[in-house]
Image (cartoon, rainbow, N blue to C red):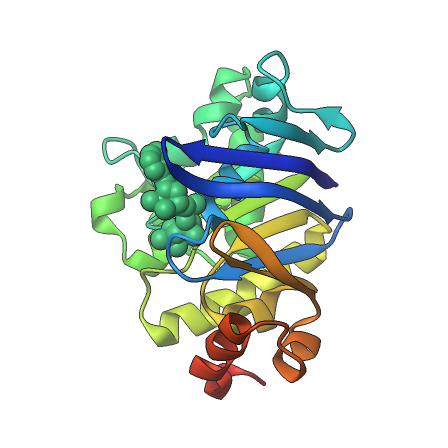
Amino acid sequence: MIQLHGVAKRYGPTVALHPTDLAVGRGDVLALLGTSGSGKSTLLRAVLRLVVPDAGMVAVDGVEVTDATALEVRRRAGYVIQGGGLFPHLTARGNAGLLPRHLGWSDARLDARLAELAELARLAPDTLGRFPAELSGGQRQRVALLRALVLSPDVLLLDEPLGALDPVTRDGLQRDLAGIVADLGTTVLLVTHDLREAAVLADRVAVMDGGRIVQRGRLEEIADAPATPFVEAFVEAQRYALP
Ligand SMILES: Nc1ncnc2c1ncn2[C@@H]1O[C@H](COP(=O)(O)OP(=O)(O)OP(=O)(O)O)[C@@H](O)[C@H]1O
């Protein structure tokens, strides 16, 4: 599970994150919703200590994330960013196999794991031999997901993983991703500004505004009873996307 207690971050005069508490239970999927600049990525990145908080405590599966433990925590976490963040000079297989190779996996073990994940992510096996520039946006995101899942992470951190895709591709991948995380039972923290994505993927949501979580709960509860004018406007702007 993922826990944050009083985690805060500022950049000079800008408060990116006011002291924030958050817990994502084991196997749960929580979506952080909010407009651009509301602090979602800062919170997500603080979990992996890619952002070092000014105050507060982060723990992943009971391990406090500090300078000393950050590498170990990152190794047990999968992280996907918008656009996938694949290395352009490596094939899909090379990208997804980077960490396993570093850990000394054999070719046979890597190929078996990638074949299993490619099936799960509905990625044709021949795509694994291609470079990112030879893949569609949707395929790149599927490869990024493969790379994030290859070491069977306990937690998955997804920062607008489907942001750059066309609506049809996005819709298909949202459903596939929901199936994959349900099958694997992984704990997921997802950043999105898309209510539909939250509806398809998440058990619970937390809405951020100005560096604070202003409402949390099930998406239906929030849509039915928005706690602030901002949440109301945010929901109204995308009400068409709700189931
Ligand atoms: N490295 C940085 N240096 C200075 N300011 C930053 C830095 N990173 C983020 N900020 C600021 O902190 C605030 C929160 O940013 P953050 O990226 O967490 O928002 P977000 O909700 O993820 O936005 P988006 O949806 O656009 O990614 C913003 O005002 C942003 O400009």
Q: Residue at x 61, y 11 (%)?
A: 68
Q: Is residue 159 above or below residue 76?
A: below
Q: Is residue 9 above or below residue 213?
A: above
Question: Ligand 1: which quarter?
Answer: top left
Q: Is residue 12 above or below residue 71?
A: below
Q: Nearer the viewer, residue 29 or 232?
A: 232
The answer, for residue 75, to whether it is visible in the render is: yes
Q: Nearer the viewer, residue 215 or 219?
A: 215
Residue 16 horizontal side relative to residue 164, left or right: right
Q: Nearer the viewer, residue 167 or 198?
A: 198
Q: Position of residue 77 (x, y in %)?
A: 60, 34
- The N terminus sits in image quarter: top right
Q: Nearer the viewer, residue 70 or 58?
A: 58
Q: Position of residue 103 (x, y in %)?
A: 55, 17
Residue 42 horizontal side relative to residue 129, left or right: right
Which residue is situated farthest in the front direction here?
13
The answer, for residue 112, to whether it is visible in the render is: no
Residue 237 horizontal side relative to residue 158, left or right: left
Q: Residue at x 48, y 61 (%)?
A: 34
- The C terminus sits in image quarter: bottom right
Which residue is situated farthest in the top direction here?
68
Q: Residue at x 37, y 60 (%)?
A: 163
Q: Position of residue 57 (x, y in %)?
A: 68, 29
Residue 35 horizontal side relative to residue 213, left or right: left
